[in-house]
Image (spheres, helix red, strand yellow):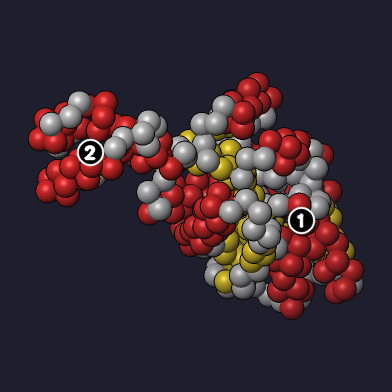
Amino acid sequence: MNIGEIAKRAGVSRSTVSYALTGKRPVSEQTKRRIQAVIDELGYRPNASARALKEGRTRTIGLVIPPAGQRLTDMQLGFVASVVDAAARADLDVLLSPSGGEHDRSFERVVSGRRVDGVILMEIRLEDDRVARLLDSGVPFVGIGHTRHPEEMSWVDVDYETLIAKCVHHLADLGHRHVALVNRSAELVAAGYGPGHRAQAGFDRAVAERGLRGVRVCCADDVQAGQTCLQQLLAAHPGLTAIATINEAAVAGLYRGLAEAGLSVPRDFSIAGVAARHWAESVHPPLTAADVPADEMGARAVELLIQRIADPATPHRHLLLAPPVSLRSTTGPAHPRP
């Protein structure tokens, strides 16, 4: 059923039906009632565009993701999928927009082009120009992650500082005295990537509290980088027996490097980290990890954004998650190597 059929049965023009649905131009109450009676009889539902025009909204939200040329991690893909699913349940469309480098024009079009009612921002840095731009624009937005100034915006985030500290304490409880933090890439950390800096803080704190020997390294997000990182760690620190990491994309490479060195996990070496739950369960051996609830985080981000779109003056809300460390197959008692 379409507007043409409604117009025919109501004895009015198509444009009159359109104006009655969108409110773009005045239509007499008598005509509106006649059109509404036909709509009720036919069970017609106006499409999303018509509803949006009537409400003055696009019924579309923007999701700003890392650059398109950068392979998304399993956790990042989980955030994207959960935002899309939660938006669909709320009858909203999602416009994906990369940001960074040459993609900044895409982000600016989302902000200034009135193409969306609000924005969800991923991969947030401690000092983030995108946050400043959104604050200046007045476009409602929510972060998956937060800046150095958490009070300036609404956000949901993982407590990386607490979770990496928990991983280190777990390793220390197993007798490990020489541990390493394998962080995200040096470029990300140097650019102020929030989770990387918070992971470093949690690692340093836990190492000091337990009197451990700790070393921090950065690693690119891929298997080969993980393997190379492990080789370099063992060469520089032969007494190393455990790793804590937030770099899930490098874990398969860490496994490969350990196997190449003739070390068995967890008999000879332990690994714990922060990762998406289904991914941590699917790798071999399954990773002991604080399981990031990507589904919940995406849904809550959409919920917070809908609230801000409805009432931009509503106070900012913050959700900081610290899930427990799930014990799987990659951590065991320390066995110092000769």
Query: In which quadrant of the rendered view does residue 32 lie?
Result: top left
Answer with left or right where residue 264 lies relative to residue 129: left
* Residue drawn at the location 37% of the way across and 31% of the way down: 25
Dot 2 alpha-carbon crowd within 10 angstroms: few under 14, some 14 to 19, many 20 or more: some
Identify residue for label 2: 31
Answer with left or right where residue 56 lies relative to residue 105: left
- How far apart are the two marked residues, 2 and 1, measured between alpha carbons? 52 Å
Location of the C terminus by quadrant is bottom right
Location of the N terminus by quadrant is top left
Q: Which SS class for mark 1?
A: helix
Report the amino acid beneath label 2: Thr
Q: Is residue 227 above or below residue 162?
A: above
Mark 2 against mark 1, which lies toward the viewer? 2
Q: Position of residue 41 (x, y in %)?
A: 12, 48
Looking at this view, is 272 or 262 the one in front? 272
Report the amino acid beneath label 1: Pro
* Residue drawn at the location 84% of the way across and 48% of the way down: 236
Answer with left or right where residue 48 lies relative to residue 221: left
